[in-house]
Amino acid sequence: MGDYIMAGAAIIILFCGGLAYISYRGYKKSKRAKRAKEATAARLGATMSGTLKHVSGLPLAKGLMVEMFYGPDKIVFKKDGQEISVARDKVTGIDFVTGDGSGRKALAGAASGKYVAGGAGAAVGALAAIDTYLVISYTSDGQNKSVKLDAAGSGLFPSKVAKDFQKTHRVKRTKIEL
């Protein structure tokens, strides 16, 4: 009976040791990735960085996750070693916008919310289904262009970028005749 207890204890100790080793290895890997991202941000002169999903405006496929480095001199988009940059003096606006909520996605969110939590759940479900985007407008070769990025899973990064740009951007007076 004592041998079974010792064998069980040994198995439990080996299992816990294996879990600790796997956790430590993952921690070290994430630490290396964070250090590499910070080194890239420093090399590019970025004050903020985050990962967003590309919607339109970059010479990349729609739906790809892109690293964005925002700094006082330029904005850089990085994907698989490719760097695409826009000088800050060409940027005319950075806006954090939400979709109108009238599409199928909002209706599906409202329906699922109502099913789970009634009327209040329908309202919350519809709000949760509204898309949010970071839109960067700039001029290139005399034409107005924009980059649209899906900001849904990016935390506070998109709103911080939009607020910082509005705070630090100096508007150039232009006259537009219609």
Image: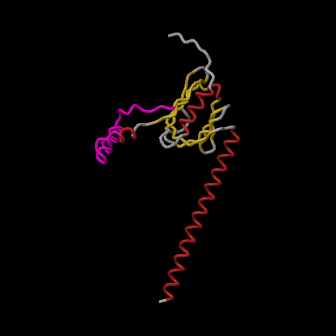
Residue visible at 54% across and 31% down in the picture: 147
The quadrant in which residue 23 appears is bottom right
Estimate the x, y position of residue 153 in percent, counting from the top left.
49, 43
Of all residues, the one furthest to the front in this rendering is 120
Q: Nearer the viewer, residue 85 or 121?
A: 121
Check residue 118 for magenta coloring: yes
Q: Is residue 92 above or below residue 21?
A: above
Of all residues, the one furthest to the bottom in this rendering is 1
Residue visible at 62% across and 25% down in the picture: 169
The quadrant in which residue 93 appears is top right
Check residue 77 for magenta coloring: no
Of all residues, the one furthest to the top in this rendering is 177
Q: Which residues are magenta?
A: 96-123
In this picture, residue 124 sits left or right of residue 65 = left
Magenta: main secondary structure equals helix
In this picture, residue 34 sits left or right of residue 130 = right
Estimate the x, y position of residue 101 in percent, counting from the top left.
38, 33
Q: Nearer the viewer, residue 138 or 38?
A: 38
Q: Nearer the viewer, residue 176 or 9?
A: 9
Q: Is residue 93 above or below residue 18?
A: above
Q: How is the image coloured?
A: secondary structure
Estimate the x, y position of residue 119 in percent, counting from the top left.
29, 41
Estimate the x, y position of residue 80 in percent, counting from the top left.
60, 45
Residue visible at 52% across and 42% down in the picture: 155
Q: Nearer the viewer, residue 170 or 70?
A: 170
Residue visible at 46% across and 36% down in the picture: 132
